[in-house]
Amino acid sequence: MTNRDTQYYLLLNAGHFLDHYIMLIFATVAALALSGGWQMSYAELLPLGTAGFAAFAICALPAGWMADRWGRDRMMVVFFAGIGAASVLTGLARTPWQLGAGLFLIGVFASIYHPVGLAIVTTRWNKTGMRLAVNGVWGNLGVGLAALVTGLLIDLGNWRAAFVLPGVLSMALAWPYYRVTSDIRVQGIAPKGGTQQAQSQPGTGFWRVMFCVFLTAALGSAVFQSTTVALPEIFEERVSDLATHIAGQLGDTGTRSASVLGALAFSVFAAASLAQLVTGQMLDRIGARPTLVLVSFSQVVFFLLMPGLSGWAAYGVALCFMLGVFGLIPINDFLIGTTTSRENRAKAMGLRYLVIFLTMSGVLPMIAWVHVAWGFDGLFRVLAVFAFAIFLGGLILLPKTRTRMAGEVR
């Protein structure tokens, strides 16, 4: 039987899963169900989700600010109940305007998780690098399963069920989260390793680290969005002959080649998402600076190797640079945990995710422009420049000595 502390962590992980899962339901529903049922094209439906994604970015900072003043666990209860209720309401929408309003509410409540849930993870436990990595894998599962499960629910029921059932599950988790966190507070269970505050005070070193955090957040999110969005099309261009060959070995050179191509892209995403576990171990063992330097430098190398490749070589190099892309994700949260005080950590997380999500909103036009001008080879070189800037930022701005997390046992 799990103890309260383990239940606490599992519920936080479940929250990360639901956060990404519910945010991505609409993309599959719009593609598979609504365009026919509502007599609207896919291009006409997509703008209905714009307000939700904007709220997801913009509301992260006020969510962190409220959590630092009102209480992080209270805000997480609001998250579970709010995003669940918003998802149910979206599933009951009868008009496009009602659907857009529901998606907006989903974005508002979804914005709570990253600044608040990750602030709890970095405050409560030691060995925080691995905790953040495992938590990140749960978020990746939400991204990966959203399309699969939503499509299944549409086939078994209808598109409304795809919103309502996850919404009910999220609302159901609000009560156990409240009970678990209330019991922990009543029993006076302190964060493991004590309640010592982060040692860093706002000064030259503090602002150098924070500059590195936001530099990495902006450029790293641009690299992440570019590679995750473009990889299927990159594989269509570079790996299609390989997919056709594999399909031929399976006895079908027609429709199966598309399925094989999708499976190859999925295998890269699935394997790369596990890189966060390796990064988490490195953060706990050697600290943020060497981890950031090694991960970003690996991106530079493999982005520069990618131009001109095709077939298995393109697949292998793509897998390598995606390992670096996903491996970078926990590092910034770890840096915020080592640098900011516990009282201000949720606000710092909120500001970081505001930068990330706003940067992501501008990436799609950049991909289109670079691809038209220079093709994907040009995109790889641009991404290599971004990764090299992250490498220099870590090398120059971060302290050489390992900074300990607040409350970490020596």
Image (cartoon, rainbow, N blue to C red):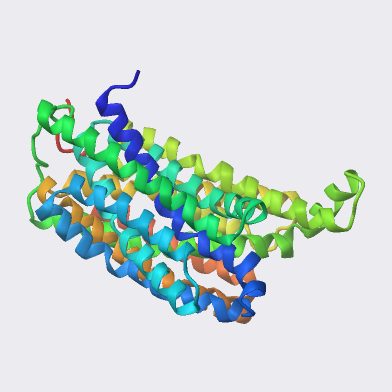
Front residue of 194/402: it is 194
User: Is residue 295 found left or right of 307 in the rendered image?
Assistant: left
Q: Position of residue 191 (x, y in %)?
A: 16, 31
Give x and y (percent) for residue 42. Answer: 61, 76
Residue at image coords 12%, 33%: 185
Identified at 36% across, 72% down, the residue is: 54
**Front-most of 178 and 223?**
178
Q: Is residue 201 above or below residue 86?
A: above
* Quadrant of the frame with the N terminus: top left
- Residue found farthest to the top: 1
Across and down, in percent, residue 370 comes to 56, 77
**From where the camera sits, is residue 306 visible?**
yes
Going by the picture, which residue comes out furthest to the right?
A: 251
Residue 249 lies, with reference to residue 10, above or below; the image says below
Percent x, y for residue 246?
A: 83, 47
Whether 352 is drawn above or below 144: the answer is below
Q: Quadrant of residue 407?
A: top left
Count numbered badges in the picture. 0
The foreground one among 196 and 38 is 38
Name the residue located 29 percent from the left edge and 70 percent from the top edge.
Answer: 58
**Which image quadrant: the C terminus?**
top left
Residue closest to the eye, 243 or 138? 138
Could you tell me if residue 205 is visible in this image?
no
Q: Horizontally, is 23 left or right of 37 in the view?
A: left
Residue at 60% x, 70% y: name it.
Answer: 34
